Amino acid sequence: MSEVLVVTSKVKKIIKEKGGMNTSSATVEVLSKAIEKLCLKGIESAKADGRKTVMDRDIIIDHI
């Protein structure tokens, strides 16, 4: 498993509160991988604009 980039307890809490469901450890891993991909895309976007700061406009979420 790669580094966890989300707060596991917070993920479990929202899934439990909003859906009444439990959360598998694989869910947290998938969310961490998705966050990592978003960060890497944000880095690419900032570099393409000649910046050293990743900004909100660099983080594009397609499927929400």
Image: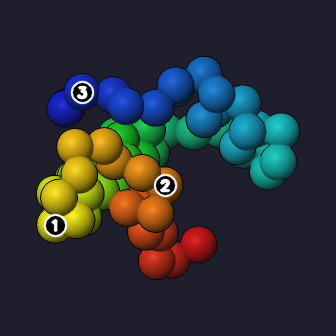
Quarter of the image for residue 20 reads top right
Task: Give the residue at mark 3.
Answer: 3
Taking the spot 23% from the left edge, 52% from the top edge, the residue there is 51
Residue placed most toward the observer, 47 or 26 = 47
Q: Position of residue 45 (x, y in %)?
A: 24, 64
Q: Which three-letter amino acid code belongs to the residue tagged 2? A: Asp
Task: Give the residue at mark 2.
Answer: 56
Badge 1: how crowded within 10 Å, few (<14), some, or many (20+)? few
Badge 2: how crowded within 10 Å, few (<14), some, or many (20+)? few
Q: Can you see residue 25?
A: no
Number of the label disc, if any, that sits on residue 18? none
Taking the spot 17% from the left edge, 58% from the top edge, the residue there is 50
43 in relation to 52, above or below: below
Task: Give the residue at mark 1.
Answer: 48
Q: Is residue 15 left or right of residue 32?
A: right
Q: Quadrant of the C terminus?
A: bottom right
Q: Which three-letter amino acid code belongs to the residue tagged 1? A: Ala
Counting residues from the N terminus, which is met first, the one under dot 2 or under dot 3? 3
Counting residues from the N terminus, which is met first, the one under dot 3 or under dot 1? 3
Q: Position of residue 15 (x, y in %)?
A: 70, 43
